[in-house]
Image (cartoon, grey):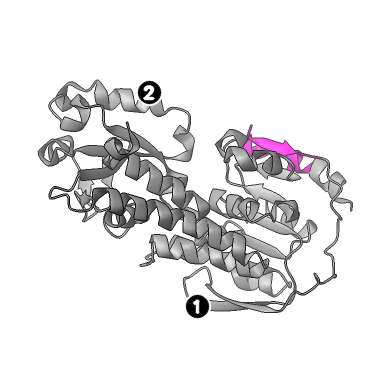
Amino acid sequence: MKLSYLLLAVPALLCAACSPIVQVHESERPPAMTEQTEAGYLPVTVENIDEKGAPASSVYEQPPQRIVAVWQNSIETLLALGAGDRIVAGMGVPDAKYIRPEYRADYETIPYTSLENLDVETILMMQPDLIVGWASTFSPKVLRGTSFWQGRGVHTYIAPSSARGAANKTIAAECSDIMNMGRIFHREERAAALVDEMQAEIAYVKTQTAGRAARPRALVIELLGREIRSYGSDTLAGDMLRALGAEHLAADGAQLSLEEIITHDPDALFLVVVEDDYGSEDAILARLYDNPALQGLSCVRNRRIYPIPLYAVYSAGIRTYDGITIFAHGLYPEIYGE
């Protein structure tokens, strides 16, 4: 079956989910996996994990040609490395407007994009040779385990920081992911440039704040209905605060009450916004700024509550840079002339 016919049929397959965020594009990309090897490509062995977090490795004899990418970090990292023309399906992004502007045009050319995942049978018909995602992507109820795909000649790559109980939710782990993708596609120089950009921002902050006696006191939270979750020291957000020299409040990652937030009285409060709330940041901030119980907080009086999208603080890929810069500007507005 030709890919264009398959893709035109996809919305019907998803009708039961009633997802409005689906884009299907006609594409000239070949419907079958190409067997050609790029000139000068040397086999690459990449150490990774399976869906349970156990070590796993893959040998790439040639760069993947037909990729299914799940979640924003997977998609945007591939776009940033110049491999966007190899993505046949990109899933997990609420809307194209949340893709970095410089990569948005390339994202729009991906034959199939949606917030929802395709089913296994449809993905098999797309004949991918690589699936990139989170550990949860390869759960039995989503796309099945990595062994299922590897038994069909399809490589899998999981962001290690997405594994349950992962201890490496760090900037270094995200940089390692980017470098791994660079090796797979022989785009090492581009991958290194993306990593260097992050390190340069951290170095700039350290230089500009050297010798300061008092560190900014920061709190990172996510609103979960009536509950308030603190992002602790074992999260990517926590590692960013550490790298930027902030005093991380509620670093144990426990649930918080409004009373505890008032007791902490952070200089800067960072509010993690999840996919369902993208675009509603102003309304969510207003709930905090207008809450009578919070009027005594320094961060409320000084208007220092900052939204930060989930894609910048969880398995963030190239958006790790966004997380670093959002934290840096919120912690040290004066060094950026703000």
Q: Quadrant of the C terminus?
A: top left
| Label of residue 55 in the image | 1
From the viewer's perspective, is residue 119 above or below residue 106? Answer: below
Question: Visible in this render: residue 144?
Answer: no
Quadrant of the rendered image containing residue 138? bottom right
How many numbered marks does the figure carry?
2
Mark identifier at residue 283 = 2
Q: Amino acid at mark 1?
A: Pro
Q: Name the image quarter holding residue 77.
A: bottom right
Give the SS element for disc 2. Answer: helix
Q: Residue furthest right?
A: 1
Q: For numbered disc 1, what is the local secondary structure?
A: strand
Side of 227 where 91 appears, left or right: right
Q: Is residue 111 magenta?
A: no
Taking the magenta stretch, the answer to whether it contains residue 15 is: yes
Q: Nearer the viewer, residue 132 or 202?
A: 202
Question: Which residues make up the magenta segment?
Answer: 9-25
